[in-house]
Image (tube, rainbow, N blue to C red):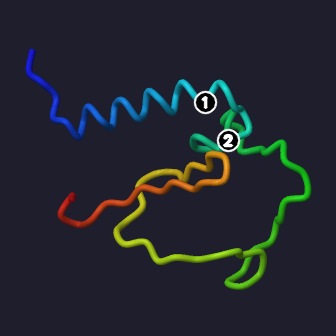
């Protein structure tokens, strides 16, 4: 059986770790449409209207093209992008 590249092994290990933690804290937004896939949050008093300045705490330009759903884990936000050449 061929050995997996180190970057792929690390990614698989990270995914496994995140999946193990998912059951420990259900209020994290860890997949498309949220913790239970319904698109509904159990949080109360959340903003429902956004603009370029309204209900925005910070903004940052991220290079590349988004290909996945953002993940909110605790007080962290994770996003994934890709470049045109695949790197």
Camera-nearest residue between 17 and 66: 17
Dot 2: few (<14), some (14–19), or many (≥20) neighbours within 10 Å?
some
Looking at the picture, how far across and down is residue 7, in whole percent? 23, 40
Dot 1: few (<14), some (14–19), or many (≥20) neighbours within 10 Å?
some
Above/below status of 57 relative to 69? below
Looking at the picture, how far across and down is residue 29, in whole percent? 65, 44
> Which residue reaches farthest bottom?
53
| Residue found at x 69% / y 32% | 25
> Which residue reaches farthest right?
45
Camera-nearest residue between 37 and 43: 43
> Which residue reaches farthest left?
2
Asked which secondary structure carries label 2, the reply is loop
Horizontal side of 74 relative to 3 (left or right) equals right
Contact between marks 2 and 1 (CB within 8 A): the answer is yes
Looking at the picture, how far across and down is residue 79, in whole percent? 48, 57
Image quarter of the C terminus: bottom left
Count of all numbered marks drawn on residues in the image = 2
Looking at the picture, how far across and down is residue 17, in whole percent? 47, 29
Q: Earlier in the sequence, mark 2 or mark 1?
A: 1
Label 2 and label 1: CA atoms lie apart by 8 Å
| Residue found at x 59% / y 41% | 30
Horizontal side of 67 relative to 35 (left or right) equals left
- Residue indicated by mark 1: 22
Horizontal side of 66 relative to 53 (left or right) equals left
Above/below status of 44 relative to 84? above
- Residue indicated by mark 2: 28
| Residue found at x 57% / y 41% | 31
* Snapshot quadrant of residue 48: bottom right
* Snapshot quadrant of residue 24: top right
Asked which secondary structure carries label 1, the reply is helix
Image quarter of the N terminus: top left
| Residue found at x 44% / y 27% | 16
């Amino acid at each position: 059986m061929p050995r997996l590249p180190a970057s792929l092994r690390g990614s698989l290990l990270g995914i496994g770790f995140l999946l193990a933690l998912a059951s420990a804290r259900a209020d994290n937004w860890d997949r498309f449409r949220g913790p239970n896939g319904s698109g509904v949050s159990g949080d109360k008093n959340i903003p429902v209207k956004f603009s370029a300045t309204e209900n925005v705490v910070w903004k940052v330009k991220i290079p590349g093209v988004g290909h996945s759903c953002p993940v909110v884990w605790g007080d962290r936000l994770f996003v994934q992008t890709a470049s045109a050449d695949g790197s």
